[in-house]
Image (tube, coloured by chain):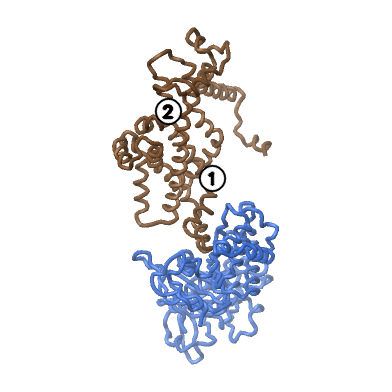
Amino acid sequence: MSVASTDNAISTGRITRAFIYLMLILFATFYLLPFGIMVLNSVKPLSEITGGNMMSLPQVFTLEPWFKAWNSAQIGVEPTGLKPYFWNSLKMVFPAVTISTVLGALNGYVLTKWRFKGDTILFGLMLFACFIPFQIVLIPMARVLGFLGIAGSTPGLVLVHVVYGLGFTTLYFRNYYQVFPTELIRAAQIDGAGFFRIFWRIMLPSSGPIIVVSVIWQFTNIWNDFLFGASFADLDSQPMTVALNNLVSSSTGVKEYNVHFAGAILAALPTLLVYIVAGRYFVRGLMAGSVKG
Amino acid sequence: MSFLKINNATKSYGSTKVLHNIDIDVQEGEFLVLVGPSGCGKSTLLNMIAGLEDITSGTIAIKGQTMNGVHPSKRNIAMVFQSYALYPNMTVGQNITFGLEMHGVAKPEREKAMSDVAEMLQIKPLLDRKPGQLSGGQRQRVAMGRALVRDPDVFLFDEPLSNLDAKLRVDMRTEIKKLHQKLGTTIVYVTHDQIEAMTLSTRIAVMNGGYVQQLGTPKEIYDNPANLFVASFMGSPSMNLVPAKVVANGDGIFAQLPTGLSDQVNLKFSNPTEALKGFDQKEIVLGIRPEAITDPEGADRKANHIEQITNRVIVTEPAGSDTYVMSSLGGKDCNARMRADALVVAGQDVPFAINMDKAIPFDPFSEMRIA
């Protein structure tokens, strides 16, 4: 196969090819540079940063800033490190991602396979959720959280993120299920499977790619969210992003840049991990959901 | 009492009526084929029997029980879909037993039923594969296995062969027929392919525009089409339908029409009906199947009356087993089926033998058969 494919490929000259690779390498470096500098400076003692070149390699290698950022850095008034906030974030992200994905899948399933009068209008209205800026919902959301008695708590944040994410997850699953053969649903109905049985046994097992898309999208958005976290969380439920801000922008004492760098990487690691693990499904799933409609 | 009774069933989407007062009785063990062009309502009718679409008015009853509003899973039917509709995430074995599992059949019984069906359809080696790893013909078998395992009252087939290639289609057709003969089950089968309808069915319902045009055995439908639609839809190559004028005199009743040699011929009807006499001096449409027009040596010896005419050959199409010969009759192209070694050349004037037993007159205005 590989032999045949070179015959058919558009032949590019050696120089063109070299140029293409050069450009690719340049851009890759350009995008990787900030991350590289963060990593370099997070393993240096502070004196090396303040005393000289940020770009140079560390003369003394130390993981001390990482431990400090994790365990003992001053966040606000408490020297707790980022650790408790990392757990806060996880406690918020997992339920929020799971609930919004499952609900989105159910919505998509109903909107495509159990059509009812006005379903397109309903879907159109749900799409609005994708275009509403965060800031607009802040005050109504605060009222709702207060009314429900979950203001300043992790469940409150979960609710906010589920509500906000539902528009996106519904859109993904609706488009994916749109091209899912309806004959399969009919066959399952004749076989005697009910609404939820069809969902669990037939639809969900065939939804791998779009579940990955939904999870990556939701995970990234919720993990990286700062506004809702800063607005609706108390000290004991603040997510990582808010804590990182408190770490970096604290105005007392020495600015420990190496600790800040380590903290920032720590905050970015989970999303990075999700992309590395599930990234190749991401494009596949996006295509599956969007190409045919 | 009939096994499956469709009584005055109609279907409307809003104000659009897609099925008009359908009345069909199917006896136990019958193989009924619903055939018609796309959009004729045949699949809708099948879905109504299955319970996948509701019935706007009228009733559908299976074994004497009205099925209106009964859930598809409670009608004891099984359906084979055009796309096979195999669950992609399950193995072949799980696909076959899913219905039994949903109906709460215990695992040992499910395994037994599955192995029986797999044996019958010769799909035992495939049981652990996923549908994605199967060929079209194998998927078709699995889909049939899934239907068979339920041991339903009625099997519903929705164009099950139309996704297969030509050769496999013929093989599977035979297989379905064998299966029906062996199991004696009641089958309702939808297709747009009139050959499938002719070969498989014990009875055919020809549908068009939401109406059943004719319901009868394959032979009735083929030999005595009720109207012009049925006449032209059933049969390949299709029936020659040529305009002619009825002339009655002391010798009998004749169809008068021009040939390609710009003269008139009078074709005498073998068994003219009273109704046909009323068409004296009026225009009709004369229907003659290609195989009823032959070379004189190839004519049916048992025919009561054969008219021999001379006509000019426009084009010949040797098909191997037969040679199709096109000539002009009544101002239209007329297809004749001659023996493969009949010596005819385009442009020649040759004798044609027309078996008038098989000639069918139609009223050009009502489009109905004159009978």
Farthest residue toward the top?
A51
Of residues B354 and A182, the one drawn nearer to the viewer in this rendering: A182
Answer with mark 1 or mark 2, whichever residue precedes in sequence: 1
Question: What type is the residue that disc 1 sits on?
Answer: Gly
Farthest residue toward the bottom?
B250
Q: Which residue is mark 1?
A: A208
Question: What type is the residue that disc 2 sits on?
Answer: Thr
Could you say whether the residue bearing mark 2 is in a helix, strand or loop?
A: helix
| Numbered mark located on residue B44 in the image | none
Of residues B328 and A275, the one drawn nearer to the viewer in this rendering: A275
| Residue A172 in sight in this render | yes
- What tint does the image give chain A? brown
Q: Mark 2 falls within which chain?
A: A
Rendering coords of residue B57 (x, y %): 38, 72
Of residues A232 and B271, the one drawn nearer to the viewer in this rendering: A232
Of residues B330 and B82, the one drawn nearer to the viewer in this rendering: B82
**On the image, which quarter does residue A147 sit in?**
top left
Q: In the image, which is nearer the foreground, mark 1 or mark 2?
A: 2
Rendering coords of residue B274 (x, y %): 46, 89
Q: Which residue is mark 2?
A: A241
**On the image, which quarter does residue A145 sit in?**
top left
**On the image, which quarter does residue B12 sit in?**
bottom left
The blue chain is B
**Do discs 1 and 2 share a chain?**
yes
Is residue B308 depicted above or below B34 in this figure? below
Rendering coords of residue A6 (x, y %): 65, 34
Q: What's the CA distance linking mark 1 and mark 2?
A: 29 Å
Is residue B25 depicted above or below B105 in this figure? below
Position of B229 with respect to A150 (left or right) is right
